[in-house]
Image (tube, rainbow, N blue to C red):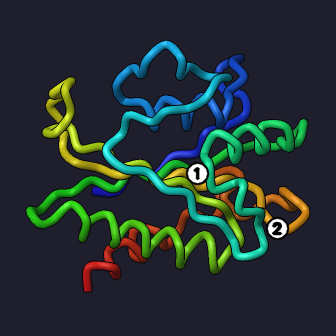
Amino acid sequence: GVTLGVLRREFSGRINSAADFAWKKLHPIMPAESSVPGKAWQPTCHRHETLLPGTASDLLLEPQLLFEQYERAVLPDQPGLLLSIKLTMLQGGSLHAFYERARSLARTEFVERRGLPVTLVMHVPSLSPAKTPARTHIHVLVLARKLGAHGFGQLGEFNGEAGRDGLVEAWLATAE
């Protein structure tokens, strides 16, 4: 139930955007025309939340502001923009318990341990008007640069392939 991937700055000659990637995850159903990339975001996902290191500005709890600030801070030679983890609900249980499990992993492994900001995005296809045949899942979007009182700083360990070892084990440990 765990899928890991890195959104690279450039892939196959295409320049990627962390803000566009996040916008698509936060909007599994197309919102009203007033909410398109570059304008006010009105997420249509089941649930979402941004987790920040303690010294980061509260203003960045809003995903749009966080990702727009991050785009402005991306380094010219930065290899990866974010680590994307998809956690799929494979067993029955409550949605809130599954969400809290993912939240605990994100807070412990990324925010507290590494100083990286995280946005959680929960999709519950069975409750969606689109009725897409898929399992409930949570996207954990981990930005690749540490965030502190003065903005984005050094690259974290998830700026490419490195640093992903142990994440599956950490997820499995949350079930114990």
Q: Circle 2 — which element?
A: strand
Residue 89 in the image: x percent, y percent? 21, 57
> Callout 2: 10 Å neighbours few (<14), some, many (20+)?
some
Rendering quarter of residue 87:
bottom left
Q: Residue at x 78, y 37 (%)?
A: 71
Residue 43 in the image: x percent, y percent? 45, 36
Q: Nearer the viewer, residue 164 or 18?
A: 18
Residue 93 as seen in the image, left or right of residue 20: left
Q: Circle 1 — which element?
A: strand
Q: Residue at x 64, y 47 (%)?
A: 82
Q: Nearer the viewer, residue 95 or 88?
A: 95
Residue labelled with disc 2: 148
> Callout 1: 10 Å neighbours few (<14), some, many (20+)?
many
Residue 158 as seen in the image, left or right of residue 137: right
Q: Residue at x 88, y 39 (%)?
A: 77
Question: Looking at the picture, does residue 109 appear above or below residue 47?
Answer: below
Q: Amino acid at mark 1?
A: Leu
Q: Nearer the viewer, residue 63 or 14?
A: 63
Question: Looking at the picture, does residue 20 appear above or below residue 99?
Answer: above
- Which quadrant, please, contains the C terminus? bottom left
Question: Residue 83, labelled with which disc?
Answer: 1
Residue 103 in the image: x percent, y percent? 43, 68
Q: CA distance from mark 1 to mark 2?
A: 19 Å
Closer to the chain start, of discs 1 and 2, is 1
Name the outermost residue toward the bottom. 176
Q: Amino acid at mark 2?
A: Gly
Q: Residue at x 69, y 71 (%)?
A: 53
- Which quadrant, please, contains the N terminus? bottom left
Residue 58 in the image: x percent, y percent? 71, 62
Rendering quarter of residue 67:
top right
